[in-house]
Image (cartoon, rainbow, N blue to C red):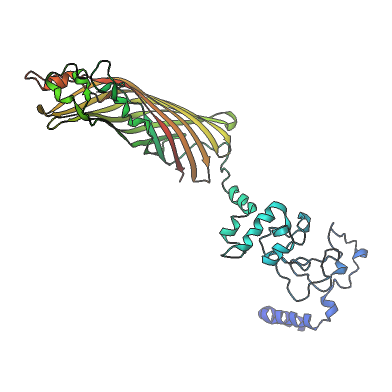
């Protein structure tokens, strides 16, 4: 009855039970609190793990974290004197964190951090050969004296290697090719249609002593910067709708011929041999030719993706609509003795719209590293608009406008490389080539110029149609939600 009363008492007051237990333990002899001090480990069958010091050699209770007993280690001690051992303490030696590892098995002899230790061991930080020699330079860092700021860490190849490791590709070999948004800076050039007609000679004569041609102002030879933006929206299993804009690239070039003697002659007068009504184009002191062009493209496609065996190869096909615009102009001018002058500017706009089909294939070289190639072909209607303005000292300014429409082929080739940085971001570079046939280019027309100085009707300028190739490279990124 008395025992039951005690149990009920402690169950009703658990805190008193805890105090009683603590008091009992305190009252025990010290030897009883250290059961390991007199334990007969050999008789109990206790097996010591490989490399572990026999428990009987421990002096005291629980060994502090990081404690190491090593009579064999140089400068070691049987026990750390002074309470809890500092983190990283090893047999009387300290590591400041910059040596990476203080394990004597790494071959770092007498490794110490800090300004003094880095120079005393003679091999640089941790005494690890080339890495140590380069890292020892960090002791002269003006910002942290080698304690680990970004400036001094960049000197060490060891830290550089760990930073480069973060740039390794991310992903899995069987990850389906996908993106939500893509943005690239595109550098493009283009071919110049219309041939390389001679415009100006220096002195009389046919064939002329060439001073200026249309090809002298070839703006398409320069790479002009633009953008390529694309977005994809999931539409069914393995399918998506893509919208792509590419453009903003503009080219311009100007070439001129000068003569203080005023002996420049124009093709309009057969280089001075047939002056006619436009003789003010001859005996010029300056003649110029200039070109300007601009490119834009918009696509809306449905794409369906598929995966090949073993995930090494992927592919897709697409159908959609495409609009492409290519504008260009050709300027020709002459300045002679006052009041003689002449200016011609032919602006031509190509507006192509139609349906397209295509596809691409991707080789998964490594997880997160891909090489792809794509092709597109479109059947488009090219609506061409021209506006030629001609002005001269012998006739009033005149503007000639006309249009035409043709059915043409348009194609695109893409070669792309993808490096996946993490789940959301990829680095992307690509080569693009777009080819179109029957593109209208600005021109100079002798018959039109001569008709403007006569009382008769104006002769419409002839169309100059030629193939166009736009090509270049891009650098950008892709993003996944």
Q: Is residue 425 above or below residue 278?
A: below
Asked if one can make out residue 326 in the rendered structure from this viewpoint, the answer is: yes
Question: Left or right: 437 with respect to 123?
Answer: left
Q: Nearer the viewer, residue 100 or 196?
A: 196
Quadrant of the image occupied by residue 284: top left
At x 58%, y 39%, the residue is 367
Residue 379 screen position, x and y as percent: 33, 22
Question: Left or right: 449 with respect to 239?
Answer: left
Q: Is residue 12 above or below residue 346?
A: below
Q: Nearer the viewer, residue 11 or 96?
A: 96
Q: Is residue 233 above or below residue 156?
A: above
Residue 171 screen position, x and y as percent: 56, 42
Count of labels in the image? 0
At x 14%, y 25%, the residue is 280
Q: Nearer the viewer, residue 460 or 201?
A: 201
Give the residue furthest to the left: 455
Residue 464 screen position, x and y as percent: 26, 20
Residue 338 screen position, x and y as percent: 13, 32
Quadrant of the image occupied by residue 351: top left
At x 88%, y 61%, the residue is 46
Asked if one can make out residue 401 in the rendered structure from this viewpoint, the answer is: no
* Quadrant showing the N terminus: bottom right
Question: Left or right: 218 with respect to 89?
Answer: left
Quadrant of the image occupied by residue 390: top left
Give the residue furthest to the front: 261
């Amino acid at each position: 009855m008395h025992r039951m009363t005690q149990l009920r008492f402690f169950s009703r007051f658990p805190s008193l039970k805890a105090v009683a237990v603590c008091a009992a333990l305190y009252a025990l002899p010290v030897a009883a609190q250290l059961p390991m001090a007199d334990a007969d480990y050999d008789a109990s069958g206790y097996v010591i793990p490989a490399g572990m010091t026999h428990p009987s050699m421990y002096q005291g209770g629980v060994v502090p974290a990081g404690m190491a007993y090593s009579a064999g280690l140089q400068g070691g001690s049987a026990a750390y004197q002074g309470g809890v051992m500092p983190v990283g303490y090893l047999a009387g030696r300290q590591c400041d964190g910059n040596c990476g590892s203080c394990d004597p098995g790494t071959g770092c002899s007498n490794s110490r951090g800090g300004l003094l230790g880095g120079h005393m061991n003679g091999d640089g930080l941790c005494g690890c050969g080339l890495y140590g020699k380069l890292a020892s330079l960090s002791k002269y860092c003006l910002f942290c004296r080698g304690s680990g700021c970004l400036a001094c860490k960049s000197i060490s190849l060891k830290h550089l290697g760990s930073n480069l490791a973060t740039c390794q590709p991310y992903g899995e070999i069987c990850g389906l090719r996908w993106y939500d948004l893509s943005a690239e800076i595109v550098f493009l050039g283009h071919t110049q249609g219309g041939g390389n007609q001679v415009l100006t000679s220096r002195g009389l004569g046919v064939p002329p002593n060439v001073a200026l041609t249309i090809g002298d102002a070839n703006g398409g030879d320069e790479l002009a910067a633009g953008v390529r933006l694309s977005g994809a929206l999931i539409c069914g299993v393995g399918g998506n709708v893509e919208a792509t804009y590419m453009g903003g690239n503009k080219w311009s070039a100007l070439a001129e011929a000068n003569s203080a003697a005023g002996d420049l002659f124009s093709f309009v007068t057969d280089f001075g041999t047939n002056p006619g009504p436009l003789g003010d184009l001859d005996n010029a002191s300056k003649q110029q030719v200039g070109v300007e062009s601009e490119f834009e493209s918009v696509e809306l496609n449905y794409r369906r993706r598929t995966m090949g065996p073993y995930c090494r190869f992927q592919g897709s096909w697409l159908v959609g609509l495409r609009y492409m615009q290519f504008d260009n102009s050709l300027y020709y001018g002459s300045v002679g003795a006052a009041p003689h002058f002449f200016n011609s500017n032919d602006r031509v706009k190509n507006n192509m719209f139609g349906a397209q089909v295509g596809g691409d294939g991707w080789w998964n070289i490594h997880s997160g590293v891909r090489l792809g190639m794509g092709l597109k072909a479109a059947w488009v209607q090219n609506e061409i608009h021209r506006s030629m303005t001609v002005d001269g000292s012998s006739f009033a300014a005149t503007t000639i406008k006309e249009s035409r429409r043709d059915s043409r082929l348009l194609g695109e080739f893409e070669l792309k490389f993808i490096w996946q940085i993490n789940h959301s971001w990829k680095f992307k570079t690509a080569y693009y080539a777009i080819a179109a046939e029957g593109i209208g280019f600005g021109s100079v027309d002798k018959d039109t110029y001569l008709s403007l100085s006569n009382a008769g009707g104006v002769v419409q300028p002839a169309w100059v149609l030629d193939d166009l190739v736009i090509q270049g490279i891009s650098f950008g990124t892709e993003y996944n939600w």
